[in-house]
Amino acid sequence: MKKTLMFSVLLLALQSGPACTTTFGFDPSLLKKLLSDVSAWNTMRANEPSRTIDLDKAKLEDADLDNADLNNARMVRAQLNGASLNGANLRDAKLLFAKLKRSNLKETDLAGANLAGADIKNSYAKAANFNGANMAGADFRFANLEGANLAETSLENSRFFETNLSNADLRGANLTGAKLLRQAQLNGAMISNNTILPSGKRATSLWASLTGARYSEEAEKSPIVMKPEPLPALTASPAAGNPEQEATGIENSAETLLLQDVTAWNTLRKENPEMEPDLQAENLDDAGLEGADMKEVMMTSSSMNGANLDTADFSDSDLVNTSWKRASLRETVFRNANLQGSNFERAFMKNTDLSGANLSNAELYGARLQGAQLNNANLSKTNLYDADLTNADLRGAILTGASLIYTIFDNALVSAETITPSGKKATSGWAALKGAKFVRKK
């Protein structure tokens, strides 16, 4: 029997806290209680301080959660876009890869929280407390963090374009690899010699003066580094030999393993070839998963819009009705994958391998498919409006009913086995009209 991994096992990067012992996903009863009455929720938290709060992947868009007690809650990949969390207590909460776009976080207490990879774009976090938080890889573009406490935080590889950091406390913050910090507003921000700049060097009074920040000297400390915990051994449960219990044991040990450690994910798949990852209806928008081993995964109706999946391998995967708008798919492999009804609008797919793939009824409007391998692919009823197929291999491809308006075929390979939109086999004349090359052999 093959073992099925749900999303909880995806890409394996243990961040903080012990391994979870429940299924990855929120507790519906807790979610209902939180949404119905914040005051009653806070009373429950006060009366049951040791109760586990599991809101992983909870849908809380536009929720009114002002002053809610979410201390130490598990909210991994929670959907909080547009939510109001003013004055809420989120100390030590697990918010890895949470969606917090346009959220209100005024005076919210997020000290010690794990916000690694969180999307906080356009949020309003004036005077919020992030002291000691892990925000590596977080996206703060266009966010307002005026007067926020960011002291002793990990901000490695985070993004700060047009972020308002006026009067924020960045003393001791580690900004190694941070992007676009120079485009942030830093007037009046507190910087010290313990602030680590994007270059990896310590801040200086000169750097502070050039950015309008205030500089102070402190006793020198080692840079803040918040490393992931080591990957736990994926061993069978006590009832060894029982396939169902063994699968459960592996899932549970991996539930806190998250996005962006592709090497660990690939190692897991290599060591457990019988696994069948089940990632249906997942939101992986903007994820960075270059080189991921995604062969034979079940991902129907999932969304990868804007994601970077260069060189990833989706061979033989079930990807029906998936969305890849504006995704980077350079040299990505979709060999023999089922991509019926999928949307690749304006995706960058240079040298992508789609040989033998089923792309019927797919949307490839504006997709850049230069050098793509589409030999023997099913492109029937596919929209290729304004798609660029320069140097693509279309030998044996089925284009019955496909829309080829403004499609670029410069030097694309076409053979007698290529089926044109009319349902007839391609000819040298048809190829010449398209600017393609007609080859006699398949």
Image (tube, rainbow, N blue to C red):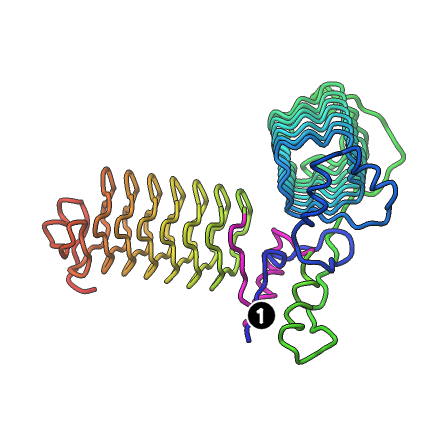
Q: Is residue 161 above or below residue 133?
A: above
Q: Is residue 61 left or right of residue 132?
A: left
Q: Residue tagged by mark 1?
A: 3
Q: Residue at x 73, y 53 (%)?
A: 228
Closer to the camera in the image, 190 or 121: 121
Residue at the outermost right position: 219
Q: Is residue 321 left or right of residue 208?
A: left
Closer to the camera in the image, 189 or 316: 316
Residue 25, horizontal then vertical, whole percent? 65, 52
Residue 49 in view, yes or no: yes
Q: Quadrant of the N terminus?
A: bottom right
Write the start and end of the magenta stretch as one range: 256-282
Q: How many marks?
A: 1
- The answer to if 258 sits in the magenta stretch is yes
- Would you identify the image quadrant in which residue 333 lies? bottom left
- The answer to if 193 sits in the magenta stretch is no
Residue 56, horizontal then vertical, whole percent? 67, 48
